[in-house]
Image (tube, rainbow, N blue to C red):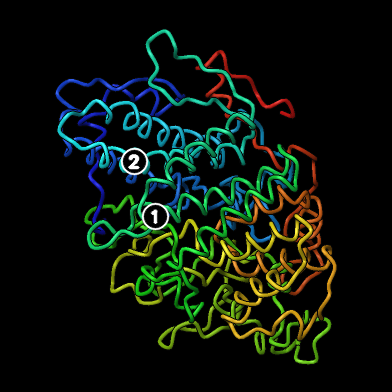
Amino acid sequence: MEKIKYILIIGLCFACSQDFVETNPKGALASGNFWQTADDANLALTGCYDVLQENFLYSLRNMNQGSLRERENFTDNSMNGFLYQGYNNIKDGTLNPSSKDLPIERPWRALYKVVGRTNQVIANVPQIEDISDEEKNVILAQAKVIRALAYWNLMNTWDDVPLITTLLGPDEQEVPKSPAIDIYNQIVSDLEEAGAVLPQVWTGDEYGKVTSGAAYSLLAHVHLFAYGYLNVQDAAQKAADVAAKVINSGVYSLFPDYASLFTPENEDSNEIVWSVRFTAEIGGNNEEGFNHSKDTQPQAITQPLPNLVNAFYMKDGLLIDESPLYNPDAYWENRDPRWDATIVYPGEKWLDNKPEFNLIGGLKRTGYAIDKYIISDNGGIPQGTGGQDWYIIRYADVLLMRAEALIETGNTGAEVYQLIDMVRQRVDMPKIEDVEGAGLSSAQLTDILRHERRVEFAFEDTRFYDLKRWGTMQEAYERSADDKKPGGDSPILTGVEYQGERSIVLPIPQSEIDVNKALEQNPVW
């Protein structure tokens, strides 16, 4: 797919679905003279890709937008320095369904906007006569994967949500919730069908479209998350099997330089299984720009918490309180290379022509900033814009998903070590056997695997789902509550208190319930 700004087609063919797009899951598309040609089908499919670029989903051009990517602040990894934006309120218990805070209303609406657009494609493309069945199937498969991504986000954020897979008539506008297991089953069906149809790779101008690898990798995530809905071993075996398909395809490999992986120069590497494509070559306000691409400064609105900073191992594979390499006066030295690629620390000489980094004023809450995805020289493009792609799934994730699934099925053999070691050794960290030893138990390997996921994917929007499916959110809250302000003993975040299900399931926006009388609030809210 040519990396240009996707053509917005709301005005062309989605004009009659504004209620669905902007408020609640309802509405249908007026056909008119549309849905007649292959160009119509591809234009509508482009609209499905386009909506993923929205501020409320995977873009972060404006930090006030309530992006999905801000869910890292719901965990022990980070906090939002602008307290008024509401990203910390799930941890302090002040979030409520009627709140106008950002984390719930805007992502909900944007995700159902994705559902609406993909449903239009899935319903209307089969009727187009001047397009082959093979081409129709590939278009439909792409729409199904994008819809599955939307429902995956809805399910793991809100659990039971309205499941809409058809176009709704005027008398079908009020839609109740479906159980999460039904959402899971629909996602599985969509991804299995799509994976069997989609090509393994797209080339040329079509690069960036979803592939069979993207479908199967997302399916592995969905199966792992189904621990709460299925027999754990059954879910894990399904995840292990589907991850193996991606690994055995031979399409993907780990990029050798972790730090430069998160730059425009390497966003087309073989490690990237699926990404949301962005470009800096957009005029105007660049509403689909990538906010982490800030010229001359790191991203310091979302701030890493000290417990994450301290979780990264030293180069010898030991924690800072165990390793002889650790020097508290130079704590940035001899760390896991992913530490420096992820964290900007106080006093770091981040750019040669700029002063050392230090947070100031009201933003000086943790003292740290994010380095990952930051473009230090953005070619003079204004702050808040940029062409860096957002990686939905990387090959490292596939390797660690299979390792986790194997452990859950009771398999603690050599393959588990090999999978985790591949991710470690990409950054020259020692093998498991060289530090933790051989013949480890499932519990020991689980701890290693979970640590590896945390440091490998920090600030890539995986932590919330990981903690939720592992049942370890309470421990994460306790770590957040123990974090202290720089140079002091007072807590960084006040009022942090684990509240059971309320800490892992967001409330459905009250505004959505008000306009959809069949929609009921999550029971815990």
- How many angstroms separate mark 1 from mark 2 (CA)? 11 Å
- What's the residue at 26%, 36% (across, down)? 133
Determine which of the numbered discs, if any, sits on residue 48 in the image: 2
Residue tagged by mark 1?
A: 276
**Can you see residue 433?**
yes
Query: Which amino acid does the dot numbered 2 rest on?
Result: Cys
- What's the residue at 44%, 12% (across, down)? 172
Q: Residues within 10 Å of mark 2 (few under 14, many from 20)?
A: many
- Where is residue 18 shown, x and y percent of the image? 34, 25
Marks 1 and 2 in Cβ contact (< 8 Å): no
- Where is residue 265 shown, x and y percent of the image? 35, 74
Determine which of the numbered discs, if any, sits on residue 500 in the image: none
- Where is residue 234 shown, x and y percent of the image? 71, 45
Image quadrant in which you'd find residue 99: top right
Q: Earlier in the sequence, mark 1 or mark 2?
A: 2
Does residue 249 appear to the left or right of 359 in the view shown? left
Image quadrant in which you'd find residue 481: bottom right
Q: Secondary structure at mark 2?
A: helix
Query: Which amino acid does the dot numbered 1 rest on?
Result: Val
